[in-house]
């Protein structure tokens, strides 16, 4: 803690959780106040900007998919490098069908733009035939 106070090291998430517990505040509130300070904003100004960021996540479909991302309160890995190739193909084609852009798809799925581009341009039928 001393090194954090003297700016000799960056706090870990665990350290920040301990600080929040010690202050008896929510971790997100602690981080919001710190982020507002860094941006030279009041906490209310920061929260207004944050509401806009949450709206962006909503438009990307992230909020609607949250329930499926957790099992027993733990986040399940959905990183593109961990999903199978078939799952990536299906996810990219689903985003395409939903009318998302390749850029949005890459961000949402955690895939490289080049990977999304390759999967985007290949007809779904090719993958069905390869899997058969």
Image: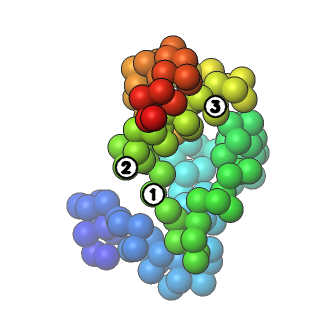
Circles 1 and 2 in contact, beta carbons < 8 Å = yes
The residue singled out by tag 3 in the image is: 95
Q: Which residue is mark 2?
A: 82
Q: Which residue is mark 1?
A: 77
| N-terminal-most mark, 3 or 1 | 1
Q: Residue at x 36, y 43 (%)?
A: 81
Sequence-wise, which precedes: disc 1 or disc 2?
1
| Residue 57 x, y percent position in the rendering | 68, 42
Q: Secondary structure at mark 1?
A: loop
Across and down, in percent, residue 31 comes to 55, 61
From the image, which quarter does the C terminus lie in?
A: top left
Where in the figure is residue 96, as x and y percent of width and height? 64, 25
**Up/down of 73 relative to 110, above or below:** below
Asked if disc 3 and disc 2 are in contact, CB closer than 8 Å, the reply is: no
Q: Which comes sooner in the sequence, label 3 or label 2?
A: 2
The mark found on residue 51 in the picture is none
Q: Which residue appears at 56% of the width and 42% of the height?
A: 39
Image side of residue 107 versus residue 48, left or right = left
Which of the image's four quarters has the N terminus? bottom left
């Amino acid at each position: 803690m001393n090194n954090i106070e003297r700016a000799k090291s960056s706090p870990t998430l665990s350290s920040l959780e301990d600080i929040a517990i010690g202050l008896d505040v929510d971790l997100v509130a602690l981080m919001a106040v710190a982020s507002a300070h860094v941006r030279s904003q009041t906490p209310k100004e920061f929260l207004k900007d944050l509401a806009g960021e949450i709206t962006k996540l909503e438009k990307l479909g992230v909020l609607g998919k949250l329930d499926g991302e957790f099992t027993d309160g733990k986040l399940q890995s959905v990183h593109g490098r961990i999903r199978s190739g078939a799952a990536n193909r299906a996810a990219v084609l689903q985003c395409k069908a939903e009318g998302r852009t390749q850029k949005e798809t890459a961000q949402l799925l955690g895939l490289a733009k080049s990977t999304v581009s390759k999967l985007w341009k290949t007809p779904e039928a090719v993958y069905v035939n390869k899997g058969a």
